Amino acid sequence: MSELTLRQRLDAYERLMRLDKPIGTLLLLWPTMWAVWISAEGAPSLFIVWIFALGTLLMRSAGVVMNDYADRHFDLHVERTKNRPLTAGIVSEREALWLATGVTLCAFLLILPLHKLVWALSVVALFLAASYPLTKRFLAIPQAYLGVAFGFGIPMAFAAQLYTVPPLAWVMLLANIFWAIGYDTCYAMVDREDDLKIGIKTSAITFGRFDVAAVMASYAITLSILAWVGAQAGRGMLYYAGLAVAAGMMLRHYFWIRGRERMPCFRAFMDNNWVGAAIFAGLFADYALRSGRWPTL
């Protein structure tokens, strides 16, 4: 790295943290925002919204650096990942560890104004983010573990505003687990041949010829759980309209992934950003227009 200019070095760090590819941050952000809105009954503090939005970006950035460090030898053999900065030797292993540590510290400093329960949950969130890459060595469906890691902003959001984590939060986390199994199986279908060669375990390999059915079943369970959550939270038709739009998008994914071709499967994975956004839009509109609840300063 000594021959790189400062601009080139920062560009390598940006790519290592996937700041140029925000899809992972967005898939983390939407369920966190669902929880922020429901736990605040539609009127969260903008300060809380800012903390969780920025915290999501920071933790996702730290998580992908730790993921690349853990997978640095496997990524050499996968077409899609062989040119990542750490794998290609543009960023050193030591730099990657320092970068992950620094970003994680920034994320922790961000939550210091919040309740101590959030601090405790952040330790669990860090463990989940750091250990997820290892699960691909022994778990048949590591995407379920990813769903826990990607959804841990849910209990943290409830803890930040209610100073406790009610059962509803854990049910929402369960919905996120099934959603992650669905969208990340689409992602795993892109790399299935490479993963089989190097011995990585993924849901696409575990489900085999039932992979498409598993994706659609996971989607259906996600929406069913979120419909129950809406009933428990007293939400109305605008919330369910958001779920209906999300269901239509998910149904479209079936036609994209049924041929198991790489690019359509990747397209379905990427489209899940809009699924999460549709659910949030319905939730936001239901609180704002039906209940008259808006974010506060």
Image: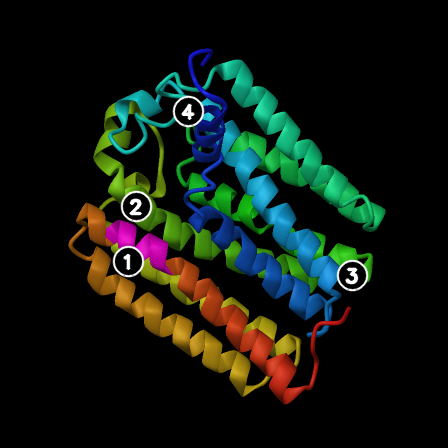
SS class of the residue under badge 4?
Answer: loop
- Per the model, the C-alpha gap separating discs 4 and 3 is 36 Å
- N-terminal of the pair, mark 2 or mark 1, is 2
In the rendered image, which residue does mark 3 sit on? Answer: 161
In the rendered image, which residue does mark 2 sit on? Answer: 207
Q: Which residues are magenta?
A: 265-271
Structural crowding at the residue carrying mark 1, measured as other residues with C-alpha within 10 Å and reported as few (<14), some (14–19) or many (≥20):
some
Question: In the rendering, at what x and y percent does residue 150 appear?
Answer: 54, 47
Residue at the location (46% across, 56% down)? 178
- Per the model, the C-alpha gap separating discs 3 and 2 is 39 Å
- N-terminal of the pair, mark 3 or mark 2, is 3
Q: Is residue 76 visible?
A: yes
Asked if residue 177 is positioned above or below residue 203 in the image, the reply reads: below
* Magenta residues, dominant SS class: helix
Which of the 4 image quarters holds residue 138?
Answer: top left
Q: Nearer the viewer, mark 4 or mark 2?
A: 4
Question: In the rendering, at what x and y percent does residue 151 appear?
Answer: 57, 51
Identity of the amino acid at label 3? Gln
SS class of the residue under badge 1?
Answer: helix
Q: Is residue 83 magenta?
A: no
- Per the model, the C-alpha gap separating discs 2 and 1 is 9 Å
Identity of the amino acid at label 4? Asp
Given contact means CB atoms under 8 Å apart, are the residues at marks 2 and 1 in contact? Answer: yes
Camera-nearest residue between 144 and 278? 278
Q: Which mark is residue 213?
A: 1
Given contact means CB atoms under 8 Å apart, are the residues at marks 3 and 2 in contact? Answer: no
SS class of the residue under badge 3?
Answer: helix
In the rendered image, which residue does mark 4 sit on? Answer: 71
